Image (spheres, rainbow, N blue to C red):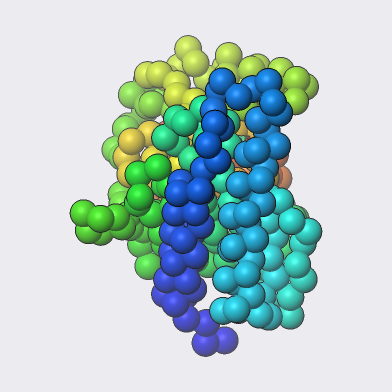
Amino acid sequence: EGLDLAALEALAVEIATEAARLVVDERPDGLGASATKSSPTDVVTVMDTRAEELIRRRLHEARPDDAVLGEEGDDQPGTSGLTWVVDPIDGTVNYLYEIPAYAVSVAVAYGDPRTPGAWGVLAAAVADAAHGTVHHAHLGGGARTTGPAGSTTLRVGRADGLDRALVGTGFGYTAQRRREQGELLMRVLPEIRDIRRIGSAALDLCAIAQGRLDGYFEVGLNPWDLAGGWLVVTEAGGVVTGPRGGGPQAALTVAGNATVHAGLAALLDD
Ligand code: IPD
């Protein structure tokens, strides 16, 4: 239908980069681990909301007929059949503590991103805000990282078994979810080289595309946490699945190069 995927990718890159700059440059004074007494999550939410407003405004100017699904605002319906899936700050706890691993993820999808198995990502950008770089891809076009030093092609690593795999994971915010996640971690940990909890699902996925992680799993991700990174991984030659639901929003997300993905999926799929 004449969609220009490279143009959608370029728009995602432009908007994610702009929002990442806002999040870094306008970080409120005094925000940090020491501010925990005065309701720090609210302060983070202010930046989350500001970044998402910027993204929605820019998307509306450029693509008024597309829908928007974001972490902070209401679902914005559209008529084009495309939905932008937006996470204004992925890795909010890192942002709060000034740990430089948080990202702005802007992805454009077909189908219904709220229905597991019923959607896919066409183009995406994940801006690594603290480093001033952006990982980006469009379907069939490969994945790249672009920054002040130029642009490089991404390719997943060659780990050929779980015992050689450095694996990322993450934890949600409720006790019940964490119990479940802890149980999965107990299955995986004895089998792998080591585990990392970097704190941003979007950057974990992009790390696989860069060959800095070999695999990743997490139960309970939201579409905005994984949409952008999902395309970056697959365009870098990796595999992403949700074994329990059929699509990228399924309850259990598993990612890696083909070998590590298969090993993790076999361990985790009961
Ligand atoms: C969180 C991060 C984290 C993952 C959580 C997500 P947020 O996103 O991606 O790494 O483990 O499940 O909720 O809340 O920082 O946007």
Residue 50 left/right relative to 153: right
Above or below, 3 against 46 in this view is: below
Which residue is at a point 54% across and 31% down the rendered structure image?
30
- Residue 156 appears in which quarter of the rendering? top left
Which residue is at a point 64% across and 66% down the rendered structure image?
56
Above or below, 261 against 61 in this view is: above
Residue 124 left/right relative to 44: left
Which percent across, then down, holds residue 152? 25, 56
Which percent across, then down, holds residue 142? 35, 62
Which percent across, then down, holds residue 133? 35, 51
Above or below, 220 against 22 in this view is: above
Which residue is situated farthest in the left direction here? Answer: 149
Which residue is at a point 33% across and 36% down the rendered structure image?
212
Which residue is situated farthest in the bottom direction here? Answer: 2
Given residues 201 and 183, the one toward you in this image is: 201
Given residues 2 and 124, the one toward you in this image is: 124
Ligand 1 falls in quadrant = top right
User: Is residue 207 in view?
Assistant: yes
User: Is residue 266 in view?
Assistant: no
Above or below, 79 against 36 in this view is: below
Instruction: Count numbered badges in the picture.
Output: 0
- Residue 121 appears in which quarter of the rendering? bottom right
Which percent across, then down, holds residue 267? 56, 25
Given residues 239 and 7, the one toward you in this image is: 7
